[in-house]
Amino acid sequence: MIGLLIILILVIAFYIGGRRGAPLQLAYTLGYFLSFAVACFSYQSLAKKLELFVPYPSVTPDAKMVFYSQNQSLDLDKAYYAAVAFLLVMFIGWLITSLIVVFLNNLRFKRLLENYDWVLGGLFNVLTAYVVIFFVLFVLAMIPLATVQNIFRDHFSARMIVEHSFILSWLFKNLWVTSILG
């Protein structure tokens, strides 16, 4: 079921990107990756402040995490707050990007590739949607609730996205887990 939902989200993302066209979607994608770069450098100071506002369920000794050991899961709240701070900065960047790109709507009528412009726009948006899906699943993987962990235990697609996403899995495990937990 999760796999079908992910495929549906990616198909809709392809359609939206195709409708926008490559130049407009490229503007969105560049804005999102600029937000990504800003988030990489500014999330840690925000993470310490989020501990007061964002709840994190406590880990019990019998909690079974899919991706983390028992020792890691006891300190995983720090990585969780770092991830939530990162996503918050990304969300603010998404809002700013969307606001700016509204004024570039005439790019919808420009073409980079005459016949295949819609395909390029769709692929740009699928890339962006995949990164968002990865972020959501990666943060969910840090929550020590049995119902959330069962998603990863029972659904191959969710587990594969978190563990084997090209560059993303390695980067965010190092950025959010290894560098924070040591």
Image: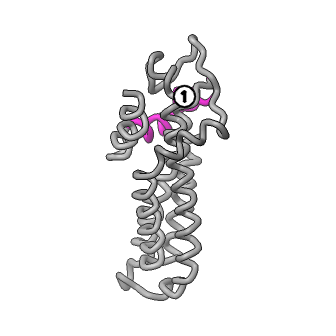
- Residue 115, above or below 55: below
- Quadrant location of the C terminus? top left
Which image quadrant is residue 180 in?
top left
Which image quadrant is residue 118 in?
bottom left
Which image quadrant is residue 81 in?
top right
- Residue 133, above or below 137: below
Q: Residues within 10 Å of mark 1 (few under 14, many from 20)?
A: few
- Quadrant location of the N terminus? top right
Residue 122 can be seen, yes or no: no
Residue ID at (59%, 65%): 95
Magenta region includes residue 154: yes
Horizontal and vertical percent for residue 103?
56, 83
Residue ID at (56%, 36%): 140
Horizontal and vertical percent for residue 125?
47, 64
Horizontal and vertical percent for residue 6?
54, 48
Horizontal and vertical percent for residue 128?
46, 59
Residue ID at (47%, 78%): 24
**Residue stretch in magenta:** 146-163
What secondary structure predominates along the stretch shown in magenta?
Answer: helix
Q: How is the image coloured?
A: one colour
Magenta region includes residue 42: no
Q: Is residue 40 left or right of residue 129?
A: left
Give whichever of 169, 45 is nearer the camera: 45
Give the secondary structure at mark 1: helix
- Residue 100, above or below 71: below
Which amino acid lies under the numbered mark 1 shown in the image of this protein?
Answer: Asp
Residue ID at (48%, 48%): 43
Count numbered badges in the picture.
1
Residue annotated with mark 1: 154
Name the residue at the top extreme.
Answer: 61
Give whichever of 130, 97 is nearer the camera: 97
Residue 12 can be seen, yes or no: yes
